[in-house]
């Protein structure tokens, strides 16, 4: 098995799959990678102790053995180049597994490869070093229109470690995961993971409205809800918007404190101007415009983030952000 990219999700998946593969390798961006130097990585799953795993790693795809399966865990904005590299090295018949956020990557992969599996991640993971990841447990949804065999193999291996659900329609599950990711830009703007107790009621209102707008767009787009353990239902998201704050805010606060820093906030913290904004809030805003659905919260967060991430990325208080959005949306 070859894992392209050494982010937290790929490290966590690699650890779970390690006992079931004969050879596990990483394709990394630079020859200075810790994975190349050490030949091993570590993961901490929930409250369990750290586990260490051996691996091969290289920054040159030509130095790696031809794998049976390729797991792609790069950022969406790097996917086209990575896909071309994999196809050139191993051909279009190699089974590929995507662990990416967003929806657009499905089309990119299916145009390049004949056997594509979507592994949609409904858990949090973050790196504490280039070769160490902490994982907050949660389910994985597997779906494919072209490769039932690989789905079965992954389900058998991964089900020993984490909840697995097989979904018939990759498009549905990717869109449902999109709802969960709409708050990533918001959490980045307010610096949530350094300010977990600040303006929680305002943050709850912002988050609930972002997600509920997303649900309304998906319903009009004909997407079917995919229900997974630990993932809020669309009805629950609606209730989070309409119920009194004294009911929903304590629940929201408890759930949020259990979350790790999201991938977009990690990109911002690392000083990157390239993020998944366009594939998350940007995609939803574009789809909403086509379907003529009003999404003022997502539109405001999308436009605010684009400017904010260029001018220094200093956190904005949720109450200030909500006031700006209220002015923007006339709510």
Image: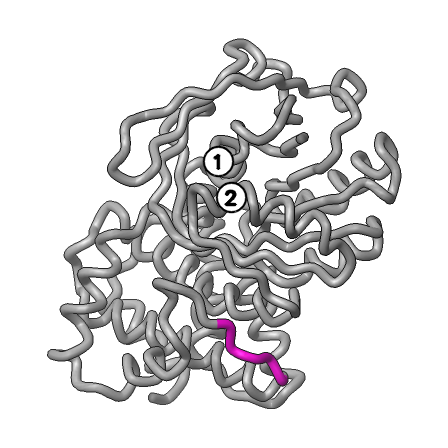
Question: What percent of the width, then of the height, locates residue 219?
Answer: 55, 85
User: Which of the marked residues, 1 or 2, is nearer the chain's N terminus?
Assistant: 1
From the image, give the main secondary structure of the stretch colored magenta.
loop
**In the rendered picture of this protein, how many numbered marks are placed on residues?**
2
In this rendering, position of residue 148 left or right of residue 172:
right
SS of the residue under disc 2? helix
Q: Of residues 307 and 172, which is closer to you in this image?
A: 172
Residue 282 occupies quadrant: bottom right
Q: Which quadrant would the C terminus be assigned to in this image?
A: bottom left
Question: What percent of the width, then of the height, locates residue 277?
Answer: 54, 58
In this rendering, position of residue 75 left or right of residue 177:
right
Residue under the image location 19 percent in, 76 percent down: 248
Residue 289 magenta-drawn?
no
Q: Is residue 111 above or below residue 325?
A: above
In the picture of the structure, the residue carrying the numbered disc 2 is 158
Q: Of residues 307 and 234, which is closer to you in this image?
A: 234
Residue under the image location 54 percent in, 13 percent down: 39
Q: Which mark is residue 16?
A: 1
Q: Is residue 278 visible?
A: no
SS of the residue under disc 1? helix
Q: Which mark is residue 170?
A: none
Q: Is residue 31 above or below residue 67?
A: above
Q: Is residue 41 above or below residue 71?
A: above
Give the spatial CA distance, label 1 vs label 2: 6 Å
Categorize mark 1 by other alpha carbons within 10 Å: few (<14), some (14-19), many (20+): some
Tell me where the magenta segment starts and ends, as one range: 222-226
Residue under the image location 23 percent in, 71 percent down: 202
In this rendering, position of residue 313 left or right of residue 19:
left
Q: Which quadrant would the N terminus be assigned to in this image?
A: top right
Question: What percent of the width, then of the height, locates residue 275?
Answer: 54, 49
Question: What percent of the width, then of the height, locates residue 17?
Answer: 54, 34
Mark 1 vs 2: CB contact within 8 A: yes
């Amino acid at each position: 098995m070859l894992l392209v990219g050494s982010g937290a999700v790929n490290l966590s998946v690699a650890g779970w799959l390690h006992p079931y593969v004969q050879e596990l390798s990483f394709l990394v961006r630079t020859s200075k990678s810790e994975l190349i130097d050490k030949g091993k990585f570590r993961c901490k799953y929930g409250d369990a102790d750290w586990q260490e795993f051996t691996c091969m790693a290289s920054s040159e795809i030509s130095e790696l053995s031809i794998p049976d399966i390729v797991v792609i865990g790069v950022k969406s904005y790097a996917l086209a180049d990575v896909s071309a590299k994999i196809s050139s090295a191993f051909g279009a018949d190699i089974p590929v597994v995507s662990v990416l956020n967003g929806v657009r990557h499905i089309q990119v992969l299916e145009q390049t490869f004949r056997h594509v599996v979507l592994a949609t991640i409904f858990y949090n993971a973050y790196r504490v070093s280039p070769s160490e990841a902490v994982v907050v447990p949660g389910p994985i949804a597997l779906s494919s229109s072209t490769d039932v065999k690989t789905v079965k193999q992954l389900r058998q291996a991964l089900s020993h470690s984490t909840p697995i659900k097989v979904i018939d329609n990759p498009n549905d599950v990717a869109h449902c995961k999109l709802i969960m990711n709409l708050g990533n830009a918001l959490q980045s703007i307010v610096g949530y993971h350094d300010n977990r107790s600040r303006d929680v009621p305002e943050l709850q209102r912002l988050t609930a409205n972002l997600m509920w707008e997303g649900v309304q767009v998906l319903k009009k787009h004909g997407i079917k809800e995919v229900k997974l353990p630990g993932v809020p239902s669309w009805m629950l998201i609606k209730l989070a918007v309409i119920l009194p704050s004294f009911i929903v805010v304590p629940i929201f606060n408890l759930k949020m404190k259990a979350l790790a820093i999201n991938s977009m906030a990690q990109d911002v913290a690392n000083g990157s101007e390239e993020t998944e904004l366009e594939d998350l809030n940007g995609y939803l805003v574009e789809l909403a415009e086509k379907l003529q659905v009003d999404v003022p919260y997502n539109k405001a967060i999308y436009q605010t983030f684009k400017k904010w991430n260029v001018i220094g990325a200093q956190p904005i208080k949720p109450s200030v952000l909500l006031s700006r959005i209220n002015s923007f949306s006339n709510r």
